[in-house]
């Protein structure tokens, strides 16, 4: 007991230094992600006392034992709110204004009620490319993966241990729900650049560093249209944009967000018309302040339709987003909707009529029914340690193209190969390269990993059994081995990361 108290005292003496480091690392925007009065097209400084009382305080329960963040840091926070008028379309463009009934249904399928609204982290998210003609000019920059504010889950003592690398709460490194959408769209951008053009026009790994701004916009429009068209069962797609005026007056049981009430819906019967319309209004998805991720998610829901979404889900999942640690995360149903066009809540193949013990279920569980162009891999160290790692079915593990969205310890990334034949010729899978991108600003080059499934066999018991598990068994390697069991993996000089 005495030793524990001394340890706590030592940690407390270092708290000021740690808080200074936090301020320098620009993490407060993530920490205070639940604020915001709607102020038309402006930025404003807001005192902490007002921030606590606004937008999302009813959505997030704060621990009474948690320490309050220093107001000196909060006053430096610059928060964008409403969509700039330059990104709002004219009502004369056409389309159909959203009705109050549809807006209510939209809220319910997203949040499970009509009172939750998207928080700051979602509102500020859009599809932002890396610099044109750079090593990563094909790549989107995703939301940063950083710890949330201690009041959501930590005591200040726990938070201090976390920053010092002494905390094992891996799930607290979750990215916001927008990142799952960004990385799924990234996978379809890679599909467009590598595989959808005639061979003479397709990009190679070398030329992926030569993508200009216009080609970035064309690739984004093609990726968004591809996903929406699949969700509409290749018969129709709906694109939602925002006008400058409200389309309806909200009911008393509906929380105004000054955004959803301004939606204008455009439905297309041809995929090319969908792509062209998105390209002509690409600024509504790829410019700062556009709320581009939310607009695309709305478009995805409308393309699939509320009725079909309700049929896709099962009794384990009644809505698409999950409130966790102060942020709305994307459930597996959202990821599957992006990849397969169907919001099935599970990653196994087909429909399951039995539980893990083999007992009949009162209602079936919905899994993945068909292979899609882009696949999915999942690995969690925390789940693996307790034997609860979900088994991803072959429909997702073996897609039509060698591109996978990866969920690794609750963060999203993309793994891919430019070799179209990788999954159709078993001889190709003896020795091959995979390329990895995690969406984070700290990654400056696409990582190349060499996978050997033939001459060497990796065993978990080999090597040094002491020290950091991430060094002994890098999470990305473990993710790859869920598809290629026992593969030996060479990082080609890169320090392992995910």
Image: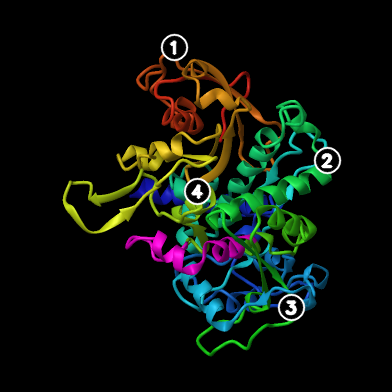
Q: Which of the two discs, 4 and 1, labels the residue nearer the N terminus?
A: 4
Q: Give coordinates of residue 300: x percent, y percent.
A: 58, 60
Tell me which residue sits at (69%, 48%) in the image.
Answer: 222
Give the extent of the magenta segment: 296-321
- Residue at the disc numbered 4: 340
Residue reaching furthest left?
Answer: 359
Task: State which quadrant residue 82 falls in.
Answer: bottom right
Tell me which residue sits at (69%, 57%) in the image.
Answer: 274
Q: Mark 1 against mark 3, which lies toward the viewer?
A: 1
344 relative position to 351: left or right = right
Q: Secondary structure beneath disc 1?
A: loop
Q: Secondary structure beneath disc 3?
A: loop
Q: Please identify the dominant SS of the magenta region.
A: helix
Residue 16 visible within the image: yes
Q: Which of the two discs, 4 and 2, labels the residue nearer the N terminus?
A: 2
Q: Give coordinates of residue 60: x percent, y percent.
A: 49, 70
């Amino acid at each position: 007991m005495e030793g524990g108290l001394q340890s706590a005292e030592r940690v407390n003496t270092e708290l000021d230094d740690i808080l200074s480091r936090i301020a320098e690392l620009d993490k407060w925007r993530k920490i205070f992600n639940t604020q915001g009065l709607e102020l038309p097209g402006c930025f404003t400084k807001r005192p902490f006392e007002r921030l606590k009382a606004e937008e999302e305080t009813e959505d997030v329960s704060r621990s009474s034992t948690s320490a309050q963040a220093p107001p000196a840091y909060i006053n430096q926070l610059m928060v964008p709110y409403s969509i700039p008028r330059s990104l709002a379309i004219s009502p004369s463009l056409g389309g159909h204004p959203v009705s109050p009934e549809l807006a209510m249904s939209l809220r319910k399928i997203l949040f499970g009620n009509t009172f939750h609204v998207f928080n700051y982290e979602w509102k500020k998210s859009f599809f932002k490319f890396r610099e044109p003609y750079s090593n990563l000019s094909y790549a989107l920059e995703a939301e940063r993966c950083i710890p949330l504010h201690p009041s959501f889950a930590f005591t200040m003592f726990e938070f201090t241990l976390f920053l010092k690398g002494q905390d094992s709460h891996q799930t607290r490194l979750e990215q916001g729900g927008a990142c799952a959408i960004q990385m799924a769209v990234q996978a379809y951008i890679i599909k467009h650049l590598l595989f959808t053009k005639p061979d003479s026009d397709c990009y190679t790994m070398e030329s992926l560093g030569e993508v200009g701004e216009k080609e970035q916009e064309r690739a984004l429009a093609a990726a968004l249209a591809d996903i929406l068209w699949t969700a509409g069962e290749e018969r129709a797609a709906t694109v939602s944009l925002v006008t400058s005026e409200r389309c309806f007056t909200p009911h008393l049981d509906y929380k105004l967000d000054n955004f959803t009430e301004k939606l204008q819906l455009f439905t297309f019967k041809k995929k090319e018309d969908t792509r062209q319309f998105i390209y002509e209004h690409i600024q509504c998805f790829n410019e700062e302040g556009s709320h581009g991720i939310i607009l695309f998610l709305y478009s995805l829901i409308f393309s699939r339709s509320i009725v079909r979404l309700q049929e896709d889900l099962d009794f384990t999942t009644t809505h698409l987003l999950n409130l966790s640690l102060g942020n709305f995360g994307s459930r597996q149903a959202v990821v599957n909707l992006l990849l397969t066009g169907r919001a099935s809540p599970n990653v196994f193949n087909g429909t399951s009529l039995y539980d893990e013990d083999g007992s009949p279920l009162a209602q079936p569980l919905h899994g993945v029914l068909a292979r899609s162009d882009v696949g999915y891999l999942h690995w969690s160290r925390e789940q693996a340690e307790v034997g609860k790692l979900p088994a991803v079915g072959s429909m997702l593990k073996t897609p039509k193209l060698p591109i996978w969205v990866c969920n690794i310890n609750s963060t999203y990334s993309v793994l891919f190969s430019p070799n179209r034949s990788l999954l159709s010729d078993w001889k190709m899978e003896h020795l091959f390269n995979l390329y990895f991108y995690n969406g984070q600003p700290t990654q400056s080059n696409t990582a190349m990993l060499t996978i050997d499934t033939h001459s060497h066999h990796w065993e978990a018991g080999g090597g040094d059994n002491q020290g950091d598990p991430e060094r002994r068994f890098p999470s990305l390697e473990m993710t790859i081995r869920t598809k290629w069991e026992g593969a030996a993996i060479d990082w080609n000089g890169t320090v392992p990361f995910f």
